[in-house]
Amino acid sequence: MSVSSRGPASRSKIACKRCRERHLKCDQKQPCDRCQANGAACLFGDQTTFILKQWTPEEAGLPPLAARFEHPVRDVSYSFINENDIIEDQYAVSNGSASPTGSPGLFRQHHSRSPPTPLMSPVSDAPPHHALSHRAPAPAAPLTSPHDAFFLDRYSHIVGPWFDLLDSEQHFTYLVPHISLSHPLLLQSALACAAKQHYLTSASQRADAALTYYDDALRALTTSLHAASHTSSTAVFASCLLLAHCEMIDASDRDWHLHLAGTLSLVLSHGWHGRSAGLAQSCFWIYCRMDVLSSLATATPTRLDTARWNPPAPPWTVDAWANTVVLLLAETHNLLCALRARRAHPTTLTSLRARLAAHAAARPFAFHPLATLPPPPGSSFAVTRYVSDAVCAAAQMFDLTHLLLLLCSPDLRAAAPTAAGYVHAVIANSVHNRRSRCWVNAVQLLTSAGAALGGGAARRELVACLRDIQTDTGWNTAGNVDALVRWWGEGWEREEGEGGEWQDGGEAMVRLLERVFEGGPAVGG
């Protein structure tokens, strides 16, 4: 593989624009201390360009670009190619512009496309506006390919709403499809997601469409990372998240972990954060959720330092409160990782406990349950109903955050009764709120909580729920089920600990929590 040019490996790579122009040291915060002290706008991302190392499909383990499919075909099994050992380190930073070296005929033209539409600046202190009213792109020529139209429709009605779980402005549902009409990379990425989901939920379908769109998207990513006009757009950021989703939904665990590591370079270079506004802000919080889920799966700290997240502040909206839960989950998980490794961590158990209590007390009215019901016949879990999918998902993440915080406690025996309640709350959320938007966010949460679940009946109900998630959404949960069964061990379906020993903090529950503290089940391990 040929070697690309890289920018200087210095702190100035992600210095803000103002500090660069004045040749001052920048602490790289968003905003940095210098700009904040002077009341100046602190902007990132204008001075750097991302390029991708040159590579060929064969070098990355990919087949030659296949001919575009003409009709849906059936009855052949396919698997996705592990190309991300190459992709992970494709991202490089270069000061100044870089000329693209890819073939000018890299994209297949399925319809007439306008030049890429620039989006809003990736860093802005302006409050967010609705996706369709804030600098909306000029209308582009609609699709004319029936196949592309079929999958873009599926994206708009299935995949886009999944991404917009905690975004009331619904950028991925309403804005991304229109931008994609004039942005080849974003279009191929959206179509790849929709085709992959369609393949995984339709047993009679082949993966030809998803594979072809995915290959095209990777080639488009190569060219887009070469072109300064593209890398200045949050459309590339959105595309990277969609491509990571293609790996996540099929449980290609190592692949999507590596892909997220590459996307982190984009985040740091552009300085995107939790208040970037518009599509950039939406992408940032989706990346953070993916980062947290990946970290939970691997029992490692989050890639992006939570000090860089720049979360929202009161007064709380549903989105802002829910996304702050994501931050609290990340910080609690990172503390647990530090305690497992017996190393120091800047966040203390006492401060986190206080922050969780304050956040719970400040929750918006919408986060209060609509109904709490006893377990229905045949179920081990009580029922709680919420007003929306966003509220339901945030409540589940907040319950897991409390569980992880209890695992950080120096006295697990005292924490066991409360921990058992949170374990049941996390799992009950998905067992009884059976909606796909919540389920696609829940798989790793269920696996993490399930490690501390006792009792054969409850475990069988969790396994059944995970399998239902795969049937309904296409999300491959087989690895999660296998990991839990290995973790629980032989005889996992037995009702060990009867007489309330699991739920009331008996010896069986304490022993299980001690095991979880040392490290939960390794998915795909």
Image (cartoon, helix red, strand yellow):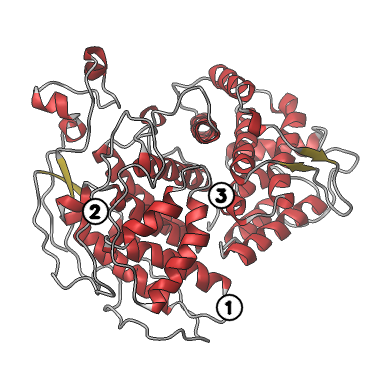
Type of amino acid at the residue the image marks with label 1: Ala
Dividing the picture into quadrants, the one containing residue 336 is top right
Cα gap from disc 2 to disc 3, whole angstroms: 31 Å
313 in relation to 186, above or below? above
For image coordinates 47% across by 60% down, the residue present is 156
Label drawn at residue 441: 3
Q: Number of callouts in the render? A: 3
Is residue 51 among what the camera can see?
no
Crowding around mark 2 (Cα neighbors within 10 Å: few <14, some 14 to 19, many 20+) is: many
For image coordinates 74% across by 27% down, the residue present is 413
Q: Which of marks 3 and 2 precedes in the sequence?
A: 2
Q: Which of marks 3 and 1 precedes in the sequence?
A: 1
Q: Which of marks 1 and 2 precedes in the sequence?
A: 2
Cα gap from disc 1 to disc 3, whole angstroms: 23 Å
Label drawn at residue 117: 2
Type of amino acid at the residue the image marks with label 3: Asn
What is the x, y in percent for residue 269?
Answer: 24, 40
350 in relation to 325, above or below? above
Label drawn at residue 203: 1
Crowding around mark 3 (Cα neighbors within 10 Å: few <14, some 14 to 19, many 20+) is: many
Q: Nearer the viewer, mark 2 or mark 1?
A: 2
Question: Position of 238 compared to 38: left or right?
Answer: right
What is the x, y in percent for residue 42?
Answer: 23, 26
